[in-house]
Amino acid sequence: MRGLTNRVALVTGGSRGIGAGVVRALAAEGVRVAFTYVRGVEPAQALVTALEQEGGEVLALQADTAKPTEIRQAVSAVVAHFGQLDILVNNAGVFVHSPVDEVAPDEEALAHLWQVNTYGTAQTVRAAVEHLSAGGRIINIGSGSNIRTPYAGTSDYAASKGALAAYTRGWARDLAPRHITVNIIQPGLIETDMTPTDSATRASLLQPIMLGRFGTAQEVGEVVAFLASEAAGYITGATLNVDGGWSA
Ligand SMILES: NC(=O)c1ccc[n+]([C@@H]2O[C@H](COP(=O)([O-])OP(=O)(O)OC[C@H]3O[C@@H](n4cnc5c(N)ncnc54)[C@H](OP(=O)(O)O)[C@@H]3O)[C@@H](O)[C@H]2O)c1
């Protein structure tokens, strides 16, 4: 155990995929965890039930990172329910395929991408930061797309995650005097609902991964749990690539 048992975390977008891996990893450390989701009430409730059966204290909140009012309400609900907030994991993020030369770009999808991945995430930090005390942690989930561009049509997604990396360094500087650390994890290809299932596409995606396999949400969750722990107290403004060697 990593000494996190008296801690409270908020994980955005925690009902499925990487976020659910983060929720599970933190709950396994005894952290009381709240997480947000937007559409999937069933997966959110299933995760709460599963973790409660294991003795965890978990709270699911329907709150869209794209909507500042819902973000503020979610942060207030966490503090009202658990009495504190120590760890914020900004995981909610969306992907848009948007080649720069496409004739009719989906303006709505592009605006939503920036609203969730960047502006809404910054709003979440602004809402949470007043509650974080010394030893607090902010952990952002970026993307390896910020450092490597092997697939066409990913520029807007990559740029939004690049902005999150820049935010990470700025927030680390701003919050260092309060002994709050801020770091970013850049996952490579992680097995989630979005991972292609046809074998030809999987084989081509696997090709540049040194370790020869996709990562798991649990593996990202374990790195979050480490960054949340006291053992990581001297790490701030840092980027951790969790990608099986994909970006190296
Ligand atoms: N999967 C990868 O290979 C990979 C690689 C690099 C980086 N990432 C990053 O990792 C993060 C998670 O990705 P994922 O693949 O795990 O995604 P995912 O499987 O699509 O899961 C997304 C989760 O976020 C929630 N969500 C979606 N939009 C939201 C919003 N506006 N506000 C709050 N919650 C929202 C979803 O809830 P509902 O189902 O209820 O909508 C769900 O719980 C993203 O930031 C992504 O960019 C993923």
Image (spheres, grey):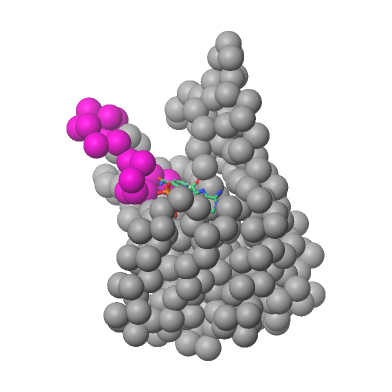
Residue 53 x %, y %: 29, 80
Residue 4 x %, y %: 49, 84
Q: Is residue 203 magenta?
A: yes
> In the shown orientation, is residue 65 left or right of residue 119?
left
Q: Which residues are magenta?
A: 185-204
Q: Note whether residue 209 is visible.
A: no
* Residue at the farthest left position: 199
> In the shown orientation, is residue 93 left or right of residue 170?
left
Which residue does the image show at 58% across and 24% down from the upper left?
Answer: 106
In the figure, residue 46 lies in which quadrant?
A: bottom left
Looking at the image, which is closer to me, 113 or 215? 113
Residue 193, relative to residue 12: is it above or below?
A: above
Q: Is residue 172 magenta?
A: no
Which residue does the image show at 47% across and 80% down from the upper left?
Answer: 31
Which residue does the image show at 26% across and 45% down from the upper left?
Answer: 212
Residue 123 x %, y %: 71, 56
Residue 32 x %, y %: 48, 80
Looking at the image, which is closer to me, 220 or 128? 128
Q: Note whether residue 142 is visible.
A: yes
